[in-house]
């Protein structure tokens, strides 16, 4: 459960952007909570992309610079290749254990200049 706190950031989603943000916050030693609506790391690569889909960008332009994508995923990774890569990224940088799965955000409302009220499907609010 997310504990409401004014001194923590909230990362929403465990897809590429959420994982990259969590890593940066972790590196900077900024306190944060990380939630994911589904039960898996990977964003649409875990729950939404068709199994036969391939990226239109190459492996080299898609990978995180600090975590090269394995050659075996091919030049244009498939859904499974991307999903596995994102899961490996999360494990490598120790992000997985901090993610609260099945915690869906349903509303975000600004509260002042630097604060947001986040409401979760459970009714919990930050």
Image (tube, rainbow, N blue to C red):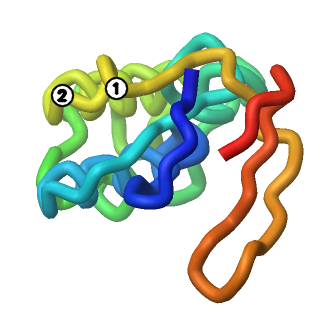
Front-lying residue, 3 or 60: 3
Q: Nearer the viewer, mark 1 or mark 2?
A: 1
Q: Residues within 10 Å of mark 2 (few under 14, many from 20)?
A: few
74 over 116 or under it: above or below? above
105 over 121 or under it: above or below? below
Residue at image location 82% in from the left, 21% down from the top: 122
Q: Could you say which disc has been placed on residue 98 in the image?
A: 1
Relative to 98, 117 lies left or right: right
| Mark-to-mark CA distance, 1 and 2 | 8 Å
Name the residue beneath numbered marker 2.
94
54 over 98 or under it: above or below? below
Kindly check if marks 1 and 2 are in contact, taking CB atoms under 8 A apart as contact: yes
Q: Quadrant of residue 106?
A: top right
67 over 124 or under it: above or below? below
SS at circle 1: helix
Residue at image location 46% in from the left, 32% down from the top: 82
Residue at image location 57% in from the left, 20% down from the top: 1
Residue 52 in sight here? no
Relative to 125, 74 lies left or right: left
x and y, in percent, of residue 45 in the image: 60, 30
Q: Could you say which disc has been placed on residue 21 in the image?
A: none
Q: Residues within 10 Å of mark 1 (few under 14, many from 20)?
A: few
């Amino acid at each position: 459960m997310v504990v409401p706190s004014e001194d923590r950031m909230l990362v929403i989603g465990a897809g590429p952007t959420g994982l990259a943000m969590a890593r940066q916050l972790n590196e900077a030693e900024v306190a944060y909570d990380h939630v994911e609506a589904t039960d898996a790391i990977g964003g649409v690569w875990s729950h939404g992309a068709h199994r036969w889909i391939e990226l239109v960008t190459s492996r080299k332009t898609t990978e995180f610079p600090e975590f090269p994508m394995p050659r075996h995923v091919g030049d244009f990774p498939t859904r499974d290749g991307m999903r596995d890569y994102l899961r490996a990224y999360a494990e490598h940088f120790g992000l997985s254990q901090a993610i609260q799965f099945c915690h869906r955000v349903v509303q975000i409302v600004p509260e002042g200049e630097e604060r947001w009220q986040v409401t979760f499907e459970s009714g919990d609010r930050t």
